[in-house]
Amino acid sequence: MMFTRRKFALTVMSLALSATMLGGGAWGQAPQAMAASDPGIAVNAVLTDMPAELKSSIEWVYTNRMLKENSVGRKNLIYDQIFAGKGTLNYVVRWQSAKNLTLQQRKDIERMLGRQINNWTKHLQGYDGWPYGEIAVKVVGWAVANPAQILDKQSGEIVYTTTTVDELSKSDPRIPAALPHAPNELSRFEHFSNPNYAYPGGLDKRFDMYLWATSNFGGGAGGDWGQRMSDDYILSTVNQNEIQITEHEIGHGFGMPDFYEPQDRPPGGFPVPTIMWAGNSPTITNWDVWLLRYTWSQLKKDTSRFPLVPAGNEPVNVASNAKVSASYVSPWETVAALNDGYDPSHSNDRAHPVYGNWPETGTQWVQYDLDRTYTLSRSDVYWFKDHGGIDVPRSYSIQYWDGNAWRDVQNAQGLGTNADAYNTTTFDPVSTTKIRLQISANAPASTGILEWKVLGTAQ
């Protein structure tokens, strides 16, 4: 992937964090930040819990900066990325540097990214329908000009060596001209606008953002594409708990703006410091936390954008974030097809991966382990039928885990086996963390599923 200056203009960014600040100028003179909340405790809060002294400034910034500048309009904010990744974020580290990277440094960088992301998202846990706990952050690739820079490469590590020319190097010869990048087809930034896009190798192989390290790069830049700063800054701060520039740039990924000019700031000023005003705070503050939460409370109203979040007490499809398993899956098929969000056009639709259990017959099962406890009351299943060895089932039942054993749902109405349509079944509400289908084949055929939705509400 190539990021030019023109492409930067399409994202929220900050380029004016000066090299002087990196050296300890204005950054080192920041006022004392207010603590946001206990980092180890979920907040269990709603928007009305916002402190009164923060309300006017936060609402002004959201309305007069974020909405007007459309920094929240692109459906590729870190909120969106986490939902699309089912509670995960994947990075590629773009190492635009001649320095080598040891195995320990690579491990430290991955852990650092997890800390910095969760330093933000821990303040969403338990807040206003946010369905995730700790976000799993993984480095899925290393982009370098020279593969020999990856010292003691492990068998599972992926290294990309394709480069292009960094336009910045033409005006600043200190910047390396060779700009390594990962394949475009694996980038969420390039494909987020296509809800049916299939990443080669599956969702786990995609990357959401770059951590972009550039030799002699002054300050930082950030947006929905990732975070950019100097290689020296990344290596010198990699083991810190809170990293000022890194967290500031991640804030842009949530749609938050900079505040360089007086007209950029709330008319009454900031009641407490903020990390988003460069040099104003070395850490995330209570003001930043409540802007993060306020933004989520506004964005979640778009249920087409965030379908896991109920509008009131309306049931939603909770399967999207579930872990999927099965009694058997054909080696060339995948259970991940059950909750990939793709609505088939017919029962032999192979535009996306499918689940099938050929050549097995008899009774098979598929199961969702949900990410939290839900009250469930409906199942929609779209059967796979290939007019060969796989047919719709003879019958099936729906079971839930009661904490000790599997139980059949009660008063199940539906249990259809029609092809080319969703088969809806309603049942008496159950509170559970697991649900499964027990499927009896229509011998001698095997069975399969294109999509399975489970509707419920979070507890």
Image (tube, helix red, strand yellow):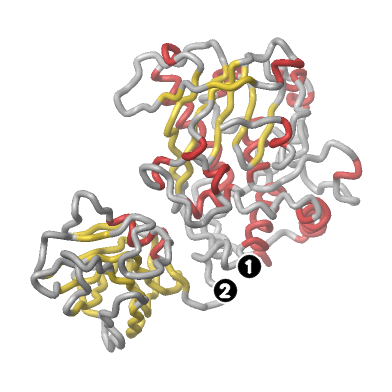
Residue sitting at x 59%, y 33%: 242
Q: Which residue carries the number 2 mark?
A: 311
The image quarter containing residue 251 is top right
Q: Residue type at mark 1?
A: Lys
Q: CA distance from mark 2 to mark 1?
A: 7 Å
Q: Secondary structure at mark 1?
A: loop
In which quadrant will I find the N terminus? top right
Q: Residue type at mark 2?
A: Ala
From the viewer's perspective, is 250 left or right of 415?
A: right
Residue sitting at x 30%, y 86%: 414
**Cβ atoms under marks 2 and 1 closer than 8 Å:** yes
436 vs 159, nearest the viewer: 159
Q: How many marks?
A: 2
Per the rendering, the mark at residue 426 is none
- Residue 153: image x %, image y %? 35, 19
On the question of residue 32 being in view, the answer is no
The image quarter containing residue 221 is top right
Residue sitting at x 26%, y 72%: 400
Position above or below: 254 against 407: above
Position above or below: 298 against 111: below
Residue furthest front in the image: 387
The image quarter containing residue 27 is top right
Per the rendering, the mark at residue 301 is 1
Position above or below: 16 against 96: below
Q: Of marks 2 and 1, which one's residue comes earlier in the chain?
A: 1
- Residue 190: image x %, image y %? 57, 43
Label 2 neighbourhood size at 10 Å, few (<14), some (14-19), many (20+)? some
On the question of residue 197 being in view, the answer is yes
